[in-house]
Amino acid sequence: MQNLFKLNNLQLSMVVNNHKQKTQKFEGFDFLRAIFAIAIVADHAGLFSVATIQELTFATDILYANFSYVAVPVFFQISLFLFYFKGKNLELSSFFQKRIVKLIYLYLFWVSTFTFLKILFTKGLTGFTNFDSLSIRNILEFIISGGNSPLYFFFSLIFITSLAAVITFLRKKIANDSLQLVISYCLLTLFCLLILSFSFTDLVVNLIGSQEISAMTAISNIARWNYNPLNFLPYLFTASITVQEFYQGDLQKQTLHLSKKLWSLFFLFLIFTLLEWFLLKNLFHYSRLSLVFGSWLLLYLALISKQKPAYTVSLVSNLSLGIYVTHLFLTHVFWIEAPNFSNAIFELLPRLYVIVRFLIVLGASIAITYLLKKTKLLNKFV
């Protein structure tokens, strides 16, 4: 009878935990989603070029390299954290299948729609970089890059989420939490070194003059490719470590250990940011450790934040996926030409054109996403 009572308590505990996981909302994530959804629209709508118009090119580079480029890493951190969190006590295979199937549907729907419209409005496949001729390499690049567009995010997320499922499966074979943490930190260090090697490939090539070595050329090309999914490997372990610390209760209370970790991440972000600015010729790619540590710091801050998001923040957060995809049709298909400033007002105030363009793209993206959310057949794609 006593054993039966214990079994019932265990089952009840599991049900309660599963219910908490389904209902728990990390409100700090709303701020990150809202801020960086708008940042991406600002990036693609050319808002940051206002600083260039004001002859502040350095400020423009900072906004692009150290603000806009943090957006995708932040979205990876959030997505992987939630995957690990929800999949910990749920049946992994069914949860993984649902998640992957949804991502594949999103990828196929948006990439096919984007490709069709771009072919229609930009004179065929020549509108796609490196897709002037059919070859296995070009087809693979097209698939991985999501039609050579920011829709590469979906392919990379499918790839990384698949690896996250493998990691979750293997971690369940290791009963010792401390050992899990040690392994995660070791693998994180390994993949950070890989990203570091990607960052400085061009620097090494220039120093040793290895342009003619095919292996170095191939590595250099992969390293500089903005759509390289390997750039996001470290986030597998930053999110995994954070989830484990969350379950251990390390993030629910302000401790000296947590404070030291936050400051450590801040200084790592600062150090690598300075190194990248001084040593790298091109900052506009994801092979940068500053993005890893910066986005990881933001993940922690979002989790420990007690601030309640305002209604508008929650609204933009809930629409963030739709904003991310729908604005691309405005900035990459229907409104891609440079401003001609034929209007007298825009000729006198060119930055006004950029600001108006950004506001129109953002407003239209929010409105379109909101309408799609209300459409029965299409709401699952936003």
Image (cartoon, helix red, strand yellow):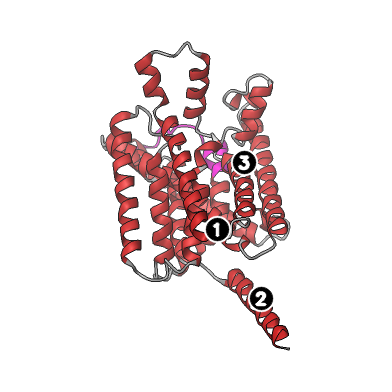
Q: Which mark is residue 155?
A: 3
Is 128 left or right of 219, judged from the image as shown? right
User: Mark 3 or 1, which is nearer the eye?
Assistant: 3
Work out whether 57 lies above or below 129: below
Is 369 left or right of 255, judged from the image as shown? right
* Mark 3 residue crowding within 10 angstroms, few (<14) / some (14–19) / many (20+): many
Residue to which mark 2 is pinned? 15
- Quarter of the image with the N terminus is bottom right
Three-letter amino acid code at the position of disc 3: Phe
Figure disc tally: 3
Q: Which mark is residue 319?
A: 1
* Mark 2 residue crowding within 10 angstroms, few (<14) / some (14–19) / many (20+): few
Q: Where's residue 191, x and y in %?
A: 48, 39
* Mark 1 residue crowding within 10 angstroms, few (<14) / some (14–19) / many (20+): many
Residue 350 visible in the current orientation: no
Stretch in magenta: 328-345
Name which residue lies at 32% across and 40% down.
273
The local secondary structure at tag 1 comes to loop
Residue 2 vs residue 166, the one in the foreground: 2
Q: Is residue 244 magenta?
A: no
- Quarter of the image with the C terminus is bottom right
Three-letter amino acid code at the position of disc 1: Leu
Work out whether 291 lies above or below 241: above
Residue 139 visible in the current orientation: yes
Is 97 left or right of 66, judged from the image as shown? right
Work out whether 144 lies above or below 104: above
Sooner in the amino-acid sequence: mark 3 or mark 2: 2
Sooner in the amino-acid sequence: mark 2 or mark 1: 2
The local secondary structure at tag 2 comes to helix
Residue 352 vs residue 253, the one in the foreground: 253
Q: Where's residue 41, x and y in %?
A: 47, 46
Three-letter amino acid code at the position of disc 2: Val
